[in-house]
Amino acid sequence: TLDNDSVVYTGEQIKPAVTQVTIGAETINPDLYQVTYGENVNVGGGTVIVTFTNYTEPSTKTFQITAKTFVFAVELTDETYTGSAITKTFTFTDTDIEPDYTLILDTDYTVSYGDDNVNVGTVTVTINGIGNYTGSATGTFNITKATLPAGEVTITLDNDSVVYTGEQIKPAV
């Protein structure tokens, strides 16, 4: 029997205490077995291995390592239109892990953007924990209009000269 069948990710090897070992109805004296552990670091199934003094085969007990809930704090600033997709860089640090652990994009979290992060308007950004982390955050930023570069805009008409007709003329651009 383990003291806990489900443990939250800590970034370190998890070693739940073995509270009792029985074979059939017989409780085994702790002096007659040795406890070792699997890797037991990342989310998924962890293992405890009990090796007996008087038996040839070890016994294995599994437990679950569950994702840690992480609070993703998102602060976004507005950007100016560039003509390309605008993305943001994030740094998230888990200060509960020694030394402080910097979460890794696409290993510990994902970033997704709304429908249009190119053109002027409001962009929605969503952060989702993955792997050893769970939790999410959503924020928005605006893409604002850019200033046209002086002297770099050229407008070409299909005809630079037209005959006066007395009506409005709209040359093709």
Image (cartoon, grey):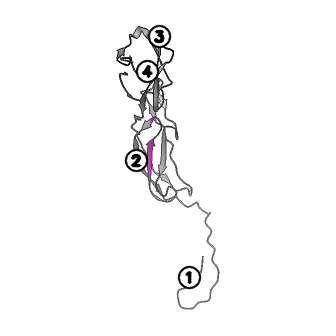
Q: CA distance from mark 2 to mark 3?
A: 57 Å
Q: Quadrant of the N terminus?
A: top left
The kind of residue tagged 1 is: Lys
The front one of 78 and 35 is 35
Cβ atoms under marks 3 and 4 closer than 8 Å: no
SS for tag 3?
loop
- Indicate the position of residue 46 as horizontal and vertical percent values: 46, 27
**Which-is-in-front pick, marks 2 and 1?**
2
The disc placed on residue 102 is: none
Report the residue at 53% width, 89% height from top.
167
Report the residue at 46% width, 34% height from top.
132
In-image side of 106 versus 62 (left or right): right
State yes or no: residue 1 in magenta.
no
- Magenta stretch: give its range: 123-132
Q: CA distance from mark 4 to mark 2?
A: 35 Å
The front one of 143 and 45 is 45
Q: Majority secondary structure of the magenta segment? A: strand
- Indicate the position of residue 73 as horizontal and vertical percent values: 40, 40
Q: CA distance from mark 2 to mark 1?
A: 46 Å
Residue at image mark 2: 138
Q: Count neighbours of disc 4 (C-alpha within 10 A) and say few if under 14, some if 14 to 19, many if 20 or more.
A: many
Q: Earlier in the sequence, mark 4 or mark 2?
A: 4
Q: Earlier in the sequence, mark 2 or mark 3?
A: 3
The disc placed on residue 170 is: 1
Residue at image mark 3: 54
SS for tag 1?
loop
Q: Earlier in the sequence, mark 3 or mark 4?
A: 4
The kind of residue tagged 3 is: Asn
Q: CA distance from mark 1 to mark 4?
A: 79 Å
